[in-house]
Image (spheres, rainbow, N blue to C red):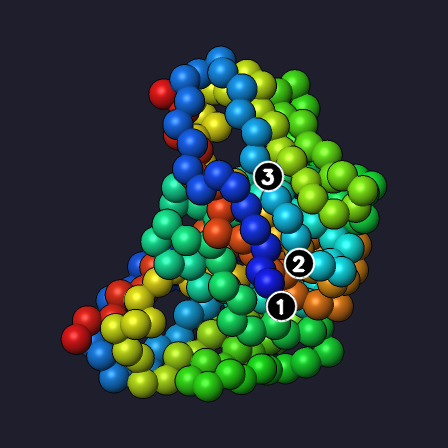
């Protein structure tokens, strides 16, 4: 069974800092990995999708990397802003026929 | 394109009552998912549909939960009877296919009292 772990569970940083969120998974035979953002009381917004053949994806100030062999992914946020405050969720798809399996998320607070 | 629509947004019921949630996926998305998210946890898959067929319902508590996908489009998730531990956000998501990512709806927040 695929286990997805996110560290840290919570993080507080001052505005302007660069930060890294970590995601690890126990079964390296994944199809793809997706990072989501969740604001309080809201649904999930997709940030980045990395296919198993890719090493990283970038969107604006966000960069996600994938190391399948070590079972790890990182989400790098550059020049953090208070508007980045949210919970960030990592999810992996085991293979093409299966649904995403989520971690518990990292709660990020960026203070002005 | 329009997003995934869910209703209602909020629902409060007493234990042992029944409740139903509705989801309309993005047009053309063959795969539809229902997830349960308990406060402080990541979403947990309840059921996955491919068109109108069930792909995975291994984590659906079938003694009280049921789901259907009508004509491969809209879907309803029902709980009968509800328990206190069913209090959660129920999220619907759809996907064009396995190569593509998910799009989630805003969710339905259920409180069972």
> Is the residue B19 above or below the residue A80 in the image?
above
Residue at 71% from the left image edge and 59% from the top image edge = B27
Residue at 25% from the left image edge and 73% from the top image edge = A82
Q: Are marks 2 and 1 in contact (CB under 8 Å)?
A: yes
Of residues A21 and A59, the one drawn nearer to the viewer in this rendering: A59
- Would you name the residue on which mark 2 appears? B26
- Would you name the residue on which mark 1 appears? B1
Are callouts 1 and 3 both on one chain?
A: yes
Left or right of A64? Residue B60 is right
Left or right of A28? Residue A42 is left
Are callouts 3 and 2 both on one chain?
A: yes
Query: Quadrant of residue A9 in the image?
Result: bottom left
Residue B22 circle label: 3
> Is the residue A37 above or below the residue B43 in the image?
below
Q: Chain of mark 2?
A: B
Real-space Cα separation, disc 1 to disc 3, in angstroms: 19 Å
Q: Position of residue A3 (x, y in %)?
A: 58, 51
Are callouts 2 and 1 both on one chain?
A: yes
Left or right of A26? Residue B99 is right
């Amino acid at each position: 069974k695929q286990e997805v772990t996110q560290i840290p569970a919570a993080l507080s940083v001052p505005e302007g800092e660069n930060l890294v969120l970590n995601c690890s998974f126990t079964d390296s035979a994944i199809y793809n990995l997706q990072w989501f953002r969740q604001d309080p009381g809201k649904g999930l917004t997709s940030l980045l999708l990395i296919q198993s053949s890719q090493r990283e994806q970038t969107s604006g100030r966000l960069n996600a990397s994938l190391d399948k062999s070590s079972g790890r992914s990182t989400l790098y946020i550059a020049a953090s802003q208070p508007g980045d405050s949210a919970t960030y969720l990592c999810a992996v798809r085991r293979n093409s026929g299966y649904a995403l399996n989520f971690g518990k998320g990292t709660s990020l607070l960026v203070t002005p | 394109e329009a997003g995934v629509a869910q209703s209602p947004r909020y629902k409060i019921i007493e234990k042992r009552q029944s409740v139903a949630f509705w989801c309309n996926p993005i047009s053309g998305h063959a795969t539809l998912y229902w997830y349960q998210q308990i406060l402080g946890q990541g979403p947990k898959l309840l059921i996955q549909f491919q068109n109108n067929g069930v792909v995975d319902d291994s984590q659906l508590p079938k003694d009280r939960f049921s789901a259907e996908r009508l004509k491969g489009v809209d879907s309803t998730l029902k709980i009968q009877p509800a328990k206190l531990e069913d209090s959660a956000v129920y999220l619907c998501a759809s996907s064009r296919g396995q190569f593509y990512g998910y799009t989630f709806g805003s969710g339905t927040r259920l409180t069972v009292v």
